[in-house]
């Protein structure tokens, strides 16, 4: 902006200083030229003042925490206010955010929208799923012990109040360890008939916030609540500014949460009621405004929450993007987030007095004979989820989506916060001059490839990176797909050099890995942006 301002001042100055010279040699026709140039100079000068004023108002609004994408603090109305985009009839125009940046990756292998039950015998609780947890927590069980769903399995020695509980009943058959003997998995062979640990009923109308927090800590439900910045398990000593829940996932092959929530409206609403008691602020529900049909009435008719509609391409469904475009994290703000199925588990704790860790998982990908939804529990074994369903063995299993998920073997387990297992072809091949000979259509924001001519085309994905790590060059690609007011490239470079002050100033506290996963996908330099961001977040957390 400074460059444009200086150029405008220079032009205005030259025009004004040239007026006396022109006046000395003016003819009858020349005087009109002088007046026209003078008028242009005045218009430029006034436009400059208005532009600077508009920018200063926006900056002041953001610094005060009042700025929201749906609000206009500028001098003049925006173009989208003068010529508003036609939205679906079910969308509330006053509570909608239109995101202009993003990119949808359309892949083959979507699941049929029918929920099936498959015999899954083995589950695991995985300490690495919880950021900040000690690598060797205090175990409360031994191999051979029988546990019920909801029984404590371990706790963090630094925060013993938070209990991490079993999602199923059965026998503890293994405690797997990784580097430096860190516990990676506590494996449980599930009973055929589930047994639950029962809890005393609690009256939400009479319970205090402290009683409610203690109830959640003991039941094993507390670790489902995540806190930003850093995406760690929520601090029970803190009261969050607000709580955010996204009701849709825009990542490739993501599950349809409208299907998942069917028949669970009472539990979902009860979970929202509980969350309202945990914050003095608001509980926000992010709704999908992209479809031809309205989202589930469980979402649109939820009470005690602020409904906010989001229209745009991926990552519109990311809760981090929704936070940024609703009420950004500034200063020392702390906000909590949960997934839809986490809210249902929270609600069932109060409707059933049980820690019911049921999950509907989308098992998807072009390498499956039959992509489908499976009803199971948290931490299901990957091999059981894809049993007798692979079209070939040359595949990679990913817990989560293809952009931000983690690679898993068949002997490993789905991560606690993932409700998707993606199966891809292993891309261990070389493609000579692939970018010079763009004959094969593939997902890309580059118009070098012809697929932009077919916006509805679904692609068969594999894991090939189509290149190696290169020089970290400035391209502007990240900012073109991230609908957040954050300069990702500058942030990444300051993380690499450990500049804490600039990291904070550039907005690191608003991000987690999934928010920049699309930036990593479009990166020409092939930089591991999610890994870099996590290193920066861990450094910030350690520094307090």
Image: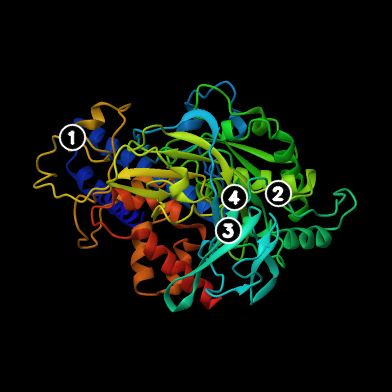
Question: What residue is shown with label 4?
Answer: 327
Give the foreground label among 1 and 2: 2
Against 37, residue 541 (above or below) is: below
**Mark 3 Cα shell of 10 Å, populated few (<14), some (14-19), many (≥20):** many
Q: Is residue 149 above or below residue 493?
A: above
Q: Report the Cα–Cα distance between label 3 and label 2.
A: 22 Å
Considering only order in the chain, which callout, 2 or 4, is on the residue closer to the N terminus? 4
Give the label on residue 134, or none: none
- The mark that comes first in sequence, 1 or 2, is 1
Q: CA distance from mark 1 to mark 4?
A: 60 Å
Which residue was labeled with disc 3? 188
Q: Which residue is mark 1?
A: 27
> Separation of disc 3 and disc 4 at Cα?
41 Å
Would residue 515 appear left or right of 294 to someone viewing this image? left
Q: Nearer the viewer, mark 3 or mark 2?
A: 3
In this view, the residue in front, 138 or 171, is 171
User: Can I make out residue 8 in this image?
Assistant: no
Gap between marks 1 and 2 measured at Cα: 84 Å
Q: Residue at x 34, y 45 (%)?
A: 480
For the N terminus, the image quarter is: bottom left
Residue 335, image x, y percentages: 62, 57
Q: Position of residue 261 (x, y in %)?
A: 63, 34
Read off the residue under disc 2. Answer: 346
> Within 10 Å of the Cα at label 4, are there few (<14), some (14-19), or many (20+) other Cα atoms?
some
Mark 4–mark 2 Cα distance, whole angstroms, equals 25 Å
Q: Earlier in the sequence, mark 3 or mark 1?
A: 1
Q: Position of residue 4 (x, y in %)?
A: 32, 52
Q: Is residue 232 visible?
A: yes
Residue at mark 3 to residue at mark 1: CA–CA distance: 96 Å
């Amino acid at each position: 902006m400074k460059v444009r301002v200086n150029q405008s001042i220079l032009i205005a100055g030259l025009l004004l200083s040239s007026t006396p010279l022109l006046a000395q040699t003016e003819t009858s026709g020349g005087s009109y030229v002088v007046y026209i140039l003078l008028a242009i100079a005045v218009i430029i000068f006034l436009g400059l003042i208005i532009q600077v004023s508009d920018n200063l108002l926006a900056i002041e609004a953001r610094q005060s925490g009042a700025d929201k994408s749906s609000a206009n603090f500028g001098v003049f109305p925006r173009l989208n206010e003068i010529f508003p985009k036609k939205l679906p009839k079910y969308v509330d125009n006053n509570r909608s955010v239109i995101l202009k940046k993003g990119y949808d990756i359309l892949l083959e292998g979507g699941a049929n929208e029918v929920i099936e039950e498959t015999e899954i015998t083995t589950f695991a609780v995985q300490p690495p799923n919880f950021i900040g947890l000690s690598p060797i927590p205090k175990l409360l069980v031994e191999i051979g012990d029988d546990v019920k769903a909801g029984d404590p399995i371990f706790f963090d020695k630094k925060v013993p109040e938070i209990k991490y509980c079993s999602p199923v009943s059965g026998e503890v058959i293994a405690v797997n360890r990784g580097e430096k003997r860190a516990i990676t998995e506590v494996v449980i062979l599930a009973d055929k008939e589930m047994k639950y640990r029962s809890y005393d009923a609690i009256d939400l109308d009479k319970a205090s916030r402290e009683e409610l927090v203690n109830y959640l800590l003991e039941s094993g439900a507390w670790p489902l609540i995540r806190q930003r910045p850093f995406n760690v398990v929520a601090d029970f000593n803190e009261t969050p500014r607000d709580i955010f829940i996204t009701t849709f996932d825009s990542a490739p092959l993501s599950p349809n949460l409208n299907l998942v929530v069917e028949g669970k409206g009472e539990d979902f609403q009860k979970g929202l009621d509980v969350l309202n008691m945990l914050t003095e602020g608001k509980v926000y529900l992010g709704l999908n405004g992209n479809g031809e049909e309205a989202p589930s009435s469980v979402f649109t008719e939820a009470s005690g929450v602020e409904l906010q509609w989001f229209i745009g391409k991926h990552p519109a469904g990311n809760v981090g993007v929704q936070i940024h475009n609703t009420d950004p994290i500034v200063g020392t703000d702390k906000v909590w987030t949960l997934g839809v199925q986490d809210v249902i588990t929270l609600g069932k704790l109060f409707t059933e007095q049980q820690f019911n860790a049921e999950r509907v998982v989308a098992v998807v990908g072009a390498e499956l004979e039959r992509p489908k939804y499976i009803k199971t529990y948290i931490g299901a074994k990957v091999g059981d989820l894809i049993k007798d369903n692979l079209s070939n063995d040359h595949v990679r299993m990913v817990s989560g989506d293809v952009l931000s998920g983690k690679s898993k073997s068949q002997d490993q387990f789905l991560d606690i916060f993932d409700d998707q297992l993606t199966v891809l072809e292993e891309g261990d091949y070389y493609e000579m001059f692939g970018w010079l000979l763009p004959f094969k259509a593939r997902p890309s924001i580059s118009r070098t490839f012809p697929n932009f001519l077919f916006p509805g085309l679904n692609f068969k994905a594999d894991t090939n990176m189509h290149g190696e790590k290169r020089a970290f060059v400035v391209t502007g690609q990240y900012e073109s797909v991230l609908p957040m007011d954050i300069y990702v490239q500058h942030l990444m470079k300051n993380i690499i050099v450990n500049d804490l002050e600039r990291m904070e100033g550039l907005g690191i506290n608003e991000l987690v890995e999934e928010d920049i996963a699309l930036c990593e996908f479009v990166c020409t330099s092939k930089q591991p942006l999610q890994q870099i961001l996590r290193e920066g977040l861990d450094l910030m957390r350690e520094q307090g």
